[in-house]
Amino acid sequence: MTATSRALLPRPRAAAPAEQDAAPRVRLALADYLTLGNALFGFMAVWQLAAAQSAQIAAGGSGPLDRGAVATAVVLLLLAAACDLFDGRVARKLGGSGMGAELDNLADVISFGFAPAFFVVAWGTIAGSGGPLPIAAAAAVLLAVVVRLARFSCETPGCTSFTGLPSPFGAMAVITVVLLDPPVLVGTGAVLVVAWLMVSRVEYPKPKGRLAYMVLAWILVSVGCLAAWAMDAPAGNTLLYSGSGLVLVLILAIPFYVVTVRRAGRPDPDEDAVPAVREG
């Protein structure tokens, strides 16, 4: 190309000062470090399960994974959920960066998509020996979380409810199914139902006000039961089934609560609450 022809080409427009000032902040904020902690804890949970699975295969063992390893992985995912819970609140109070929402979605894919899917794979390989069925269920969980997070990013801000089961609750439900160690067909079917709920049109209200305290108390009781089971407390099976049952009942009861309130013509007590920015 000659110098004359280059001179005739339009030159790139320089960014105006106002546009430069409006550029999103790309430095990490405090909330972003919590989001990165979410991703790190999810990765560590997968590492813990993979190490336990490899050790059991090398030793020629069969049956459920080591209870201590499973308990450690569950605790790590609970820490990931705690980071996911607080990063949005920190961002609203102290300010966030332009990367916040994108980082949150990427971290959620690791902790609430890939990690629970790996739980299903480990359960199917070691405990269930179910062939391709657990693999298919695990893939469904991962894809459902990816689709759900992408859809959430496109929803109109200001909604007072989630469309579909939020991914942290979905991950908790999947792990609960694995901990119960059901027959392969039953467990696979339950995991597929959870994956469907995450991409369904079923509405889950954003926990605000009294509902938030009720949900939090319910989760704490269920997690306490599962933690006591993991530490070999007396009546371990009772604790396991109680904690798991509380988790599953919570996930199934919330949509019925919404339907009952609307049919009765009562306003949702959380409709006037300010909605959360991030899904967790």
Image (spheres, grey):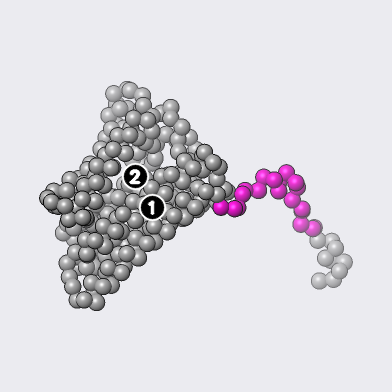
Q: Earlier in the sequence, mark 1 or mark 2?
A: 1
**Image disc number at residue 165:** 2
Quarter residue 107 falls in: bottom left
Camera-nearest label, 1 or 2: 1
Percent across and percent down for residue 35 are: 46, 52
**Image disc number at residue 265:** none
Residue visible at 65% across and 48% down in the picture: 23
Crowd class of label 1 (few under 14; some 14 to 19; many from 20; radius 10 Å) = many
Q: Amino acid at mark 2?
A: Leu
Q: Quadrant of the N terminus?
A: bottom right
Q: Is residue 128 visible?
A: no
Seen from the viewer's position, the closer of residues 70 and 103 is: 70
Residue visible at 24% across and 46% down in the picture: 224
Q: Amino acid at mark 1?
A: Ala
Residue visible at 60% across and 52% down in the picture: 26
Q: Eyeballing the image, is 112 above or below 56?
A: above
